[in-house]
Image (cartoon, rainbow, N blue to C red):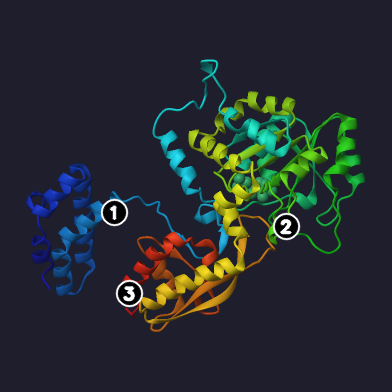
Amino acid sequence: MNKNMLYRSIPKVDILLENAAVQELIGRYSRDTVMESIHTELDKLRKFIGECEDEEAAKKQIELLPVNIEAAVAAMHTPNMRMVINGTGTILHTNLGRAPIGQEHMKRLAAIATGYSNLEYNLDAGRRGERYSHFEELLCKITGAEAAMAVNNNAAAVMLILSSLARGGEVVVSRGELVEIGGKFRIPDVMEQSGAKLVEVGTTNKTHYDDYESAITEETKALLKVHTSNYRIVGFTESVVIDELIPIAKEHGIPVIEDLGSGVLIDLSRYGITYEPTVQDSIRKGADVVCFSGDKLLGGPQAGIIIGRKKYIDMMKKNQLTRALRIDKFTATALELVLQEYLSEEKAIQNIPVLRMITRTLDEVTEEAGTLCGILKEAGLPARIELEACESQIGGGSLPLERIPSMAVAIHPEEISVAELEERMRRLAVPIIPRTVNDTVILDVRTIERRYFDVAARQLKELDWGKI
Ligand SMILES: *Cc1c(COP(=O)(O)O)cnc(C)c1O
């Protein structure tokens, strides 16, 4: 095969630029991105010819050049961040963006974010205001705390609290509470960044009151409790509850800080979920500072919410670090909207997607699953489709042992393997992320709202179900 001839048959850049399809691309996008794609596609083509031993394949690739250029330009202008359909049944899936924001909240958020707002402007006084003012009172009302603020996430909250209250001093924490919160982030490392020295007490499974008592010195600036929300130590265990720590902390004039991880504001045991200590409990028991995530069980935007005694919150608001960790208008707006729902538990359950999904009864999910199953069966896919009981999880490091009975649509493909189907579903325009169990692809309907059923069905109908 004559490679030189092949190379010579590649259209030159100026010829390509005269191509009607390429001209159209320049009109639609920009000349720069089209030129960039032409060059990268030409390089790829030359490399392909250099390595290719099949003349027909090489010719075919040369023919495909304009198509490939068009695809490359289109890809460059297509957002990579996309919505996906979560069929995993994990409600707070950190890799899938944790808590979804309610549609009504999003409309309001869009109206605020697309224009100017009173984010830091006090409309009554006509002067500078505070960005926390929009939700501080609400948080206090709901939790019973004196003051509140928020930063970018709960890891930042822990760091800010320690930096403000314990920098240069010691913080006592139980060895049973040194949590890794995922992505290799560990509470002890975050604490170290704050400039506070960690004094670990007790053992992994047992920490006693005396352990705290004997660890307190002149240097002790705070006692820290970390709610081990993402794991459980069971069996021969003992830990000291916050109520017991309050008197000894008072005696030494130091605060008790509690990192709740997933801050839950309503008693979920009413909906069949294991009781998880609420934020209100911590405040009632006397914690001086409490922090928790905005996008775990709260069901709001990514944020680290800090509540507690005013004198401590004021110290944090004045810390220079706060400026680096501050929330933006999206978060401030969304937090206010989500927190307002908590003024009524009924509203919260209805309007906060995470709570809605957690509290959906098995009957409700089964009915929805029946609808999706019917739509998929009607689509005539080359697969056996049926309802299958399954279990949903809360996820996001919250209630790790909790399994919520749920219903899934199970798909057994006829020609391809489950792994192949899973991959093809992942590559759809609106990717569908299923769970694969026992050689079945299952879509847990607890995490798929009805408005996604048609998109899911349409895409599965267009999917290539055959062997390649
Ligand atoms: C999840 C978690 C964090 C981190 O919260 P982010 O909002 O993800 O930064 C910190 N502490 C505990 C105990 C957690 O469970």
Position in image of residue 135 (x %, y %) = 60, 33
Residue at x 80% of width, y 40% of height: 284
Q: Which residue is more in the foreground, 77 or 293?
A: 293
Disc with the residue nearer the chain's start (3 vs 2): 2
Position in image of residue 227 (x %, y %) = 74, 49
Q: Which residue is mark 1?
A: 75
> Identity of the amino acid at label 1?
Ala
**Crowd band around label 2 with a 10 angstrom C-alpha radius: few (<14), some (14–19), many (20+):** few
Disc with the residue nearer the chain's start (3 vs 1): 1
Q: Which residue is mark 2?
A: 269
Disc with the residue nearer the chain's start (1 vs 2): 1
Question: Which label is found at residue 464?
Answer: 3
**Crowd band around label 3 with a 10 angstrom C-alpha radius: few (<14), some (14–19), many (20+):** some
Q: Which residue is more in the foreground, 314 or 105?
A: 105
Question: Which label is found at residue 311?
Answer: none
Position in image of residue 173 (x %, y %) = 79, 44
> Identity of the amino acid at label 2?
Ser
Position in image of residue 26 (x %, y %) = 16, 46
Residue at x 55% of width, y 67% of height: 365
Q: Give the secondary structure at mark 2.
A: helix
Residue 31 location, quadrant:
top left
